[in-house]
Amino acid sequence: MKRFFTPVFLALSLLLPLVGHALTPQEAYALSSGETDDRLKVLAQITEHVDPKAIELIKALSDDSVKISDHQVFIIQGDKAIDPVTGDALEMPANAEDVVSNNRMRGEFDAALASLSLFSPDQAVRLKAIKSMLKEPDADKLSMLDKALKVEQVEALRLQLQFAKAAIEINSTDDSLRLASAKILAGSKTPDTQRILNDRFGQESNAEIKAQIKKSLQEIQSALAWGEKLGILFTGLSLGSILLLVALGLAITYGLMGVINMAHGELMMVGAYATYVVQVFFRAHYPQWFDAYLFVAIPVSFLTSALVGAIIERLVLKYLYGRPLETLLATWGISLMLMQLVRSLFGAQNVGVENPVWMSGGIEVLSNLILPWNRMLIIVFAGLVLLGMSLLIGRTRLGLFVRGVTQNRPMAACMGVNTARIDTYAFALGSGIAGLAGCALSQIGNVGPDLGQSYIVDSFMVVVLGGVGQLLGSVYAAIGLGVINKLLEGVAGAVLAKIAVLVFIIFFIQKRPQGLFAMKGRSAET
């Protein structure tokens, strides 16, 4: 019982000091009908007090769920009609008319709901309302902020309320209020506060206040600089993890097998479309389990791309080993065929893959740094795929055969290894990992027939820079290229950053053709 009554008592402690007026039938009707200016006057009167019935009516008006007839207002809830004043069920008359609100009225409804949210028993709702007021200061909401400050008991929220109040009073005609507000806002280290102070700085004529605003801006800018640096680092790490996922499959097909697979990007695309198909299947047949579709899509995308890769290897590539130029041309032609096949099956337009609920949103580390869950989970996923691939290549019988065939095919055949079968397994493995990359990419963007074209060049650069056949080199190269690329984008733009990275790799390979890590053993000498 104690757990039940605690939030109720908290709500009453917030609301009771402010509830001095209950919604009347006349106010409900005046708010729902008449000219916009008259309705706004009634709205202003109602929002002076925190009445749950008034809040419910305002929300229903905002959602277009209100009808009127003969001075009676009806809130529509499903197939029922509710009296907004008493909460009793009513019989809906046949001549009831919909309440129509213009854009101005809708905006005022939303603003009123945001103000009244300051007194919600839910702490998260109150914080969201305060941040909304801090983002768009409105002098008309000053009285609501004062009332909220009187009843707010959470110290962190009281501080945010003071920031929101200062954001309004920074434009006061009173010099002392503006000076005090400039000092207070120095503690609110957010981009919104920085914008508010910058706007005021250009208008301020008082030298003392202007100096304080400048000082506050310097403190805020110093704090925000850390968020920007960490944001660039995280973005680079996120891009690097994606490049790593893309390059891991290529590290097998090109690094270990020597096949220049220009269809690698299209194998990623196959994995992405497999994820889309699984999503559509779950939405149609198992909507209650939709948030779990990704756990099915991961193995399906791997197996689908692996199967396509095995077919390509058996039908085409097994006849072209040792002829890199011909494998390049053949796989390029296969990539065009796969893209056209997808266009024929799914259309030329991009398809959207929806994130599960548990991958939506993010963690707010700083006021200007939010880490999205989907990108953080992709970083973790890339690490798990790398670990699994390392164990497979280094600790399993299949990995031993792959390494044996790669280093000395005739000797491996003499030892009884079926080299043709190992070639198929290895190419299917690399293709399957490309499918996993496509599954991951589907969670951060749209899926289309040209998906793989955006990453094929970057993935080859990662493999070449890291060292042919070296998984650890691919890790360093992917993360390094991701971070460097994002750092350069902030200085020179996306196009020039790509060019600069490409030029760097060309010069690096000229000086160190074997990449960051040279392959050990006799194969390095041949």
Image (cartoon, rainbow, N blue to C red):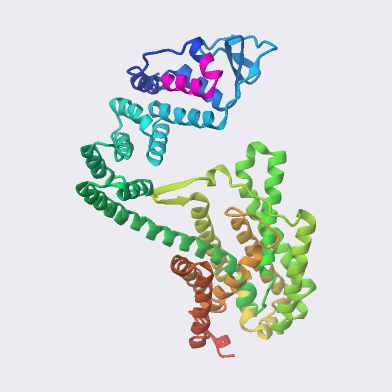
Asked if the stretch drawn in magenta spans residue 462, the answer is no
Residue 40 vs residue 132, the one in the foreground = 40
In the depicted structure, whether residue 247 falls above or below residue 207: below
274 vs 128: above or below:
below
- Closer to the camera, 247 or 470? 247
Quadrant that contains the N terminus = top left
Residue 488, picture quadrant: bottom left
Which range is magenta?
29-46
Q: Is residue 15 above or below residue 431?
A: above
In-image side of 78 versus 41 (left or right): right
Residue 320 falls in which quadrant of the image? Answer: bottom right
Q: Which residue is drawn at 49% across and 67% down?
A: 493
The residue under the point 77% across, 63% down is 340
Residue 32 among those drawn in magenta: yes
Q: Position of residue 306 (x, y in %)?
A: 70, 63
Left or right side of 520 for 144: left
Name the residue located 66 percent from the left edge and 14 percent from the top edge.
Answer: 96
Q: Residue at x 56, y 61 (%)?
A: 385
Question: What is the x, y in percent for residue 310?
Answer: 73, 67
Can residue 391 be seen here? no
Query: Magenta part mainly helix, strand or loop?
Result: helix
Residue sticking out furthest to the bottom: 525
Closer-to-camera residue (76/274):
76
- Quarter of the picture containing the C terminus is bottom right
The percent coordinates of residue 197 (x first, y second) are 32, 47
Q: Residue 169 in the image: x percent, y percent?
A: 29, 37
Q: Is residue 490 visible?
A: yes
Q: How many labels does the image show?
A: 0
